[in-house]
Image: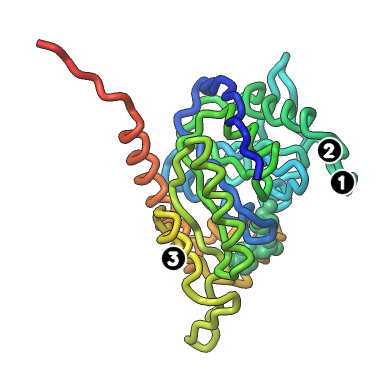
Amino acid sequence: MATHAPPQQPPKLPIPGVENIIAVGSGKGGVGKSTVAVNLAITLGKLGYAVGLLDADVYGPNVPLMMGVTATPQAIGQRIMPIESHGVRLMSMALLNPGDKPLVWRGPMLNSVIQQFLRNVEWGQLDYLVIDLPPGTGDVQLTLIQTTPLTGAVVVTTPSDVSMEDARKAVNMFEQVREPVLGIVENMSYLEHNGEKIYVFGQGGGAQTARLMRVPLLAELPLDMETRAGGDAGRPIATVSGHKQAKLFIDLAKIIVERAEEVKKKNRPTITIAD
Ligand SMILES: Nc1ncnc2c1ncn2[C@@H]1O[C@H](COP(=O)(O)OP(=O)(O)O)[C@@H](O)[C@H]1O
Ligand SMILES: [Mg+2]
């Protein structure tokens, strides 16, 4: 097999005013990546943080639908204003290209749009910018994580073997470009029925993947009809105070805040003061 030289690393420029950038990725589509990104962003907002949400899934930008946003963003000079919803500042290609017309752009064009979303959107001061990445480990994802100083990545998977196989690839992608993986979120872990847990997609896959990849398992989120319905209705489950799933998102958000602090401490250069 041919070996490839590692691609040249472009510079990573910070986004002024943005403290932490959390990328939510997955090996596969349909595993709940956007659902996790949306509910995580809303929950971080509820915990008192200033939060932005960038829908970088340019092939399937579903975040505005999930956030209940249809407004068109306004430009002020060269800056695009994000749209606020459920306490989160949002930007998505779906806001600029509404309807069912697909974008037929090639990689370089998509990369430049994502860069504009990162750098020409007036995010303001943010504690957390959550990025919903496109699924998989292709050029768009790689370019984004190579040019953006991530605090860390969250990889979403279901417990099924096919999803986990691709989740391992996603973890490897982040590690290859030396971006810390905060951990794995197992989504659609089980369905509760008459007090019994039914493991629709298999049991323990997330924990197994986390062990294998030596990263923490951050959450096991059940399959839940109201979570799906909330996403479709533009009222994500995290907005429903007291709901079981909303509580799990609070736990998840708190763990992610802890993990973000942990990896930042680890990666911060140590300064020795000579006497
Ligand atoms: N835990 C869950 N329980 C019920 N439905 C879910 C859950 N997570 C995601 N869904 C639903 O599954 C579908 C795919 O989720 P989505 O977040 O769009 O996946 P992805 O972004 O990975 O393609 C959506 O209809 C969403 O509402
Ligand atoms: Mg999605």
Pick the front one: 1 or 259: 1
What mark, if any, has residue 67 been given in the picture? Answer: none
Q: Amino acid at mark 3?
A: Ala
Query: Which residue is the extreme one toward the top?
Result: 275
Say which residue appears at 66% left-offset and 49% top-offset: 136
Q: x, y percentage for residue 56?
A: 68, 39
Asked whether the residues under the numbered discs 2 and 1 touch, taking CB atoms below 8 Å apart as contact, a structural biologist would say: yes
Q: x, y percentage for residue 25?
A: 59, 48
Name the element at disc 1. Answer: loop
What mark, if any, has residue 207 been given in the picture? Answer: 3
Quarter of the image that includes the C terminus: top left
Name the residue beneath numbered marker 2: 97
Name the residue beneath numbered marker 1: 99
Q: Earlier in the sequence, mark 3 or mark 2?
A: 2
Q: Name the front one of labels 3 and 2.
A: 3
Name the element at disc 3. Answer: helix
Q: CA distance from mark 3 to mark 2?
A: 38 Å
